[in-house]
Structure formats: structure tokens, C-alpha cells
Image (spheres, rainbow, N blue to C red):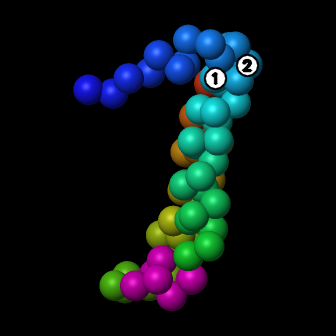
Amino acid sequence: MLNFDWGTHLSENWARFLVILAFIAPLIFTFTLPRRYIYQGAADQKMWRNLKIWIFVLIGISVSVYLYF
């Protein structure tokens, strides 16, 4: 089992900061992907197939909800 006893000493602001970093890490990874990899296997290169746009929107919503509550 995972032991998160070290987290009991963190303040709420530090815990929030760490969780937001965990949201931003996949965002940074996605923006480093080459364009040809994103559209690989797609019939066309329409804007709605762009993974970078979708990940930005979804993580943006997640982070904003997390910051609000």
C-alpha cells in the first residue's frame, strides 16, 4: 500500500500546488509531441483531431475547478 504520511505535514496551499503540477505535467508532455505523431492514422488533419487543443481545454477545466474549490 502507498504511504502518504508525509502529506500530513503539507499545508493546503502546498498540496494544491503539487496537484496542479500533476495536471500540468501531461500538458507539457503533449505540447512536446510532434505534429505528425498527433495526426498519425487520421484520415485528415482537421482542427478537432488535434490532441494539443483537447488536452489544453480538459486540463484547463480541471485546474480551474480545482482552484475554485
Q: Is residue 68 visible?
A: no
Task: Please state the extent of the stretch shown in magenta in the rendering.
Answer: 34-40
Of 68 and 8, the residue lying toward us: 8
| Disc 1 residue crowd, few under 14, some 14–19, many 20+, Cα 10 Å | some
Q: Position of residue 29 (x, y in %)?
A: 57, 64
Residue 41 location, quadrant: bottom left
Q: Are marks 2 and 1 in contact (CB under 8 Å)?
A: yes
Callout 1: SS: helix
Q: Which residue is mark 2?
A: 13
Q: Which residue is mark 1?
A: 15
Kind of residue at badge 2: Asn
Q: Is residue 56 visible?
A: yes
- Residue 52 part of the magenta segment: no
Of 58 and 31, the residue lying toward us: 31
| Disc 2 residue crowd, few under 14, some 14–19, many 20+, Cα 10 Å | few
Q: Position of residue 21 (x, y in %)?
A: 64, 41
